[in-house]
Amino acid sequence: MSNNDIFKKLRVALSLRNDDIIEITKLVGFTVTKGELGDIFRAEDHPNFKKCGDQILRNFLNGLVIHMRGPREEKGVE
């Protein structure tokens, strides 16, 4: 299963739109455009298809953790 397949399945399972994905990636300081997402979610035989790299998927997953759980709590210094 490719990164593109995983990304597509997560998008459908969580009912996310491209705007939601952009906001989720911003939570970790990563920028992705609507155009890039459109290319990632295209069929593999489309001329503008783009493989989803590890960096994009990793940043999306890290942002998704923050989106779902909230920001990480910092341990206080005693």
Image (spheres, grey):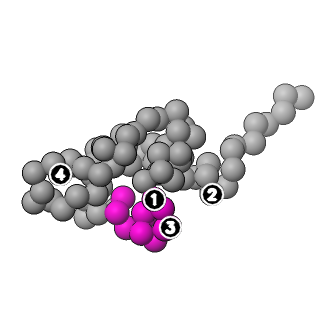
Q: Nearer the viewer, mark 2 or mark 3?
A: 3
Q: Which mark is residue 49?
A: 4
Up the image or down, 56 lies above or below 40; here it is: above
Q: Identify the residue under disc 1.
A: 17
Q: Residue at x 25, y 50 (%)?
A: 39
Foreground of the two, 7 or 32: 32
Mark earlier in primary sequence (1, 4)? 1
Which residue is located at x 34 percent, y 63 percent? 8
Mark identifier at residue 14: 3
Give the image quarter of residue 1.
bottom left
Image: magenta residue range: 7-17
Give the main secondary structure, helix, strand or loop, of the magenta stretch.
helix
Disc 1: CA contacts within 10 A as few (<14), some (14-19) or many (>=20): few
Whether the residues at callouts 2 and 1 have beta carbons within 8 Å, the answer is no
- Count of marks placed on residues: 4
Identity of the amino acid at label 4?
A: Phe
The Cα–Cα distance between marks 3 and 4, rounded to whole angstroms, is 23 Å
Real-space CA distance between mark 1 and mark 4, rounded to the nearest whole angstrom: 18 Å
**Residue 2: x and y, percent?**
25, 59
Kind of residue at disc 3: Leu
Q: In the drawing, does residue 3 fall left or right of residue 29?
A: left
Please, is residue 16 above or below residue 23 in the view?
below
Q: Which mark is residue 68?
A: 2
Q: Earlier in the sequence, mark 2 or mark 4?
A: 4
Secondary structure of the residue carrying numbered label 4: loop
Disc nearest the viewer among 2 and 1: 1
Mark 3 lies on a secondary structure that is loop
Circle 1: residue type? Arg
Q: Which mark is residue 54?
A: none
